[in-house]
Amino acid sequence: MQTICTCNLKLLFLSEYGPKVSLFLPLTRILPSKRDYPGFRSGWRHDLLAGVAVGVVALPLALAFGISTGTGAASGLVTAIVAGFIAALFGGSRFQVSGPTGAMTVVLVPIVAKYGVGIMPIVGLMAGLIIILLGLFKLGRYLAALPWAVLEGFTVGIGIVIALQQLPLALDIAKPEGSNAARVAWATLKIAIVDGFKGGPVIILLTAITLMLISGRFTKTIPASIITVIFCTLLLLFSPLEAKTIGELPRSLPMPKLPEIPASGWSAIIYAAFAVAALGAIESILSARVADGMEHAKTHLHDGEKHDSDRELFGQGLATVAASMMGGIPATGAIARTAVNVRSGARTRFAAMVHSMLLLLCVLLLAPAVGQIPISALAGILIVTAARMVNPVSVREALVTTRSSAIVLITTAIITVAVDLIWAVGIGLLLNLALTKIPMINKVIDRQ
């Protein structure tokens, strides 16, 4: 008996009788290495071209997400440059492109509305550290297993919220007080109806939406967002229209500094940090999975070539910490930009680094020109981007496959719009468990 107990204890504590399993992510999986750049010598040109293509797409989006968040266009650019480079260097995906995203603005806008821009550095720093810990404790695989209906529901909800958040910027109206996107949008419309719509912003907004929708029919080479930005900027410069522009941008990156430690309000800061970390982790893993799927369809990736979820979380957390210390906002993997990267022929993570370096050149050389872009044009770009986040085929499949998946999707989407993402994902998971897993367990019990 004593011998059996001794053997069981040895097995329990992973001694020489069993394979050693580390609780933490090993250093060999964290640090960058030559293995991160397979075929770089022969394929670096593909990475260079893909990085340029992604950088062109990312420029207007980085500006727009920074403005939409309330922290300013410069913060969006800093995030795309700093977080994009660090996440590419330390992350777990060869194809992932990171930076500010629409989904993250959904979380950040109410935080800024409630507590002001000054809270963002400490929230970003704490959120980044939480994501790093998720990676170090090897929890990435569990985030990758979120139910399909929950993901579709929260994506639909995010798309709606992003579109609603653009109304004050699109109509050039001071944002009404409040943190709920639907209420703020409704208040904005009432102000516009009472005071009258401003002609310049409305014309530029409608022009931007139209160009985003139709420009792809005429050219596949130049991204629709770049065509939209250039045309709307020229329209504003060479017409009598009046509309608010981005304004002056810094021509260098700020020096990193630690955020100020507030004396109070820690409960709000901690909740905000966990909300940001949860979304950042989920969206980054989802984006990396999408990239693997796209690349697998082209080259049939082996398991060893797919993304490392735990290392991806570590890299994303590090990127958010760095961006927050340099005046940026929390970053995540960006699905749309990652898809452009894969479609453009990227071979390694060097492509995402090129994207960040191209944006840095824009800051150094083109800041005055970028400052002339009308804000309502960026709002139009984000409205179309929000609509395109929703995949009608996937949503329809979720709605018709089973009654439980339809209920989970609709409930998650509604709570995302009405409350926030944390509650939406939490309730969606519980609802999915109640509707799918518990009945299955009961059936097994009944059979026995």
Image: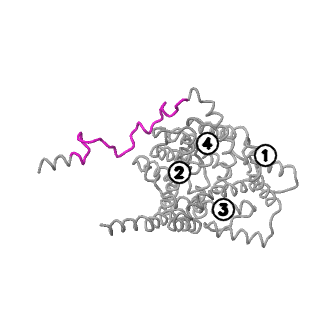
Measured in 3D between alpha carbons, the distance from the residue under mark 3 to the one under mark 4, in whole angstroms, is 24 Å
Q: Which residue is identified by label 4?
A: 81
Q: Position of residue 365 (x, y in %)?
A: 72, 37
- Determine which quarter of the picture holds residue 341: top right
Q: Position of residue 407 (x, y in %)?
A: 53, 68
Measured in 3D between alpha carbons, the distance from the residue under mark 2 to the one under mark 4, in whole angstroms, is 21 Å
Front position in the image: 318 or 392: 392
First in sequence: mark 2 vs mark 4: 4
Measured in 3D between alpha carbons, the distance from the residue under mark 1 to the one under mark 2, in whole angstroms, is 31 Å
Q: Which residue is identified by label 2?
A: 286
> Bounds of the magenta span?
10-39
Q: Secondary structure at mark 1?
A: loop
> Relative to 265, is 144 above or below?
above
Q: Do the numbered discs 1 and 4 sit on residues whose CB atoms are within 8 Å? A: no
At 70% from the left edge and 48% from the top edge, which residue is drawn? Answer: 60
Q: Secondary structure at mark 4?
A: helix
Measured in 3D between alpha carbons, the distance from the residue under mark 1 to the one under mark 4, in whole angstroms, is 30 Å
At label 2, the amino acid type is Leu
First in sequence: mark 1 vs mark 3: 3
At label 4, the amino acid type is Ile
Q: Nearer the viewer's eye, disc 1 or disc 4?
A: 1
> Relative to 361, is 63 above or below?
below
Specify how the rendered protein is coloured: one colour
Q: Is residue 100 left or right of residue 271?
A: right
Q: Which residue is identified by label 3?
A: 165
14 in the magenta segment: yes
Q: Which residue is identified by label 1?
A: 218
First in sequence: mark 3 vs mark 2: 3
At label 3, the amino acid type is Gln
Q: Secondary structure at mark 2?
A: helix
> Relative to 87, is 264 above or below?
below
Total count of labels: 4
